[in-house]
Image: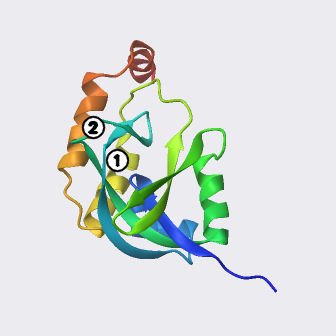
Amino acid sequence: MNTITEYLYGAYGSNLNKDQMSYRCPDAEPVTSCELKGHELKFRGVADVELGAKDSMVALGLWRITDECEKALDRYEGYPNLYTKKFVETEHGLVMLYVMVQQDTVCPPNNGYLNGIAEGYFDFKLDNKLLKDALTHSYTNQNELTRWRTRAV
C-alpha cells in the first residue's frame, strides 16, 4: 500500500505565486509565511538563497507538498543539476528549499519572472522590501560576464 508523505516546502521565488504553483503542483497547499534568518535572496537570472549575515533574512511562503509535488518541483527546478535541496529549521519545523548548485554569478531576472515573484509576495502577504533589495543588488553587483550577456540580448 502506498502512503502519501506530506511535508513543508519553502518558496522564495516563482513558486511563491499561487497560480503558478496550482499549475505545477495541484496538490500543494499554501500554509503560511515565515522569515528564514541568516540567509539572503539573490538573483542569478533566477531566484536563489545563500547564507548571509546573522541579521539577514529571506521571506518564505510555506507549502504543504506531497511526494508527487516534489517530483514535479524537481523537474521544474532542474534538480539536481541547476538546484539542489537543503533542509532548514524554521519556527514551523523542518522546511525543504531548493538552492542553486552554482552560486558564483549575480544577474537580474527578466521582467516576466520578476512579476510572477512579486505576485507571490502579494499572495503570501510578504514585505516586498526584501525582494526590492535583492533586485537592486542584482543590478549593482552583476558579474562582468552576465553584464555582457544582458547587453547582447
SS at mark 1 in the image: helix
Residue at screen point 45% across, 70% down: 63
* Location of mark 1 (residue): 114
Mark 2 or mark 1: name the one nearer the start of the chain.
1
Q: Quadrant of the N terminus?
A: bottom right
Q: Which residue lies furthest to the bottom in this view?
A: 1
Task: Estimate how packed mark 1 is, as few (under 14), some (14 to 19) or many (20 or more) residues with alpha carbons within 10 Å.
Answer: many
Query: What's the amino acid at mark 1?
Result: Leu
Amino acid found under the numbered disc labelled 2? Leu
Q: In this view, does 46 lie to the left or right of 136?
A: right
The answer to whether residue 136 is above or below residue 13 is: above
Dot in front, 2 or 1: 2
User: Do the numbered discs 2 and 1 sit on residues whose CB atoms are within 8 Å?
Assistant: yes
CA–CA distance in space, label 2 to label 1: 9 Å
Q: Quadrant of residue 30?
A: bottom left
Which label is found at residue 135?
2
Residue that appears at 27% across and 47% down: 57
Left or right position of 129 against 4: left
Look at the image and tell me whether residue 17 can be seen: no
Query: Could you tell me which residue is drawn at 59 percent across and 44 percent down?
Result: 84
Q: Answer with the quarter of the image where residue 121 lies.
A: bottom left
In depth, the one of 112 and 46 nearer the eye is: 46
Query: Residue sitting at 36 percent across and 63 percent down?
Result: 61
Question: Which x, y percent locates residue 103?
Answer: 48, 29
Quarter of the picture holding the C terminus: top left
Residue 120: x, y in percent? 34, 62
Q: Is residue 99 above or below residue 67?
A: above
Q: Picture coordinates of residue 114 (x, y %)?
A: 34, 47
SS for callout 2: helix
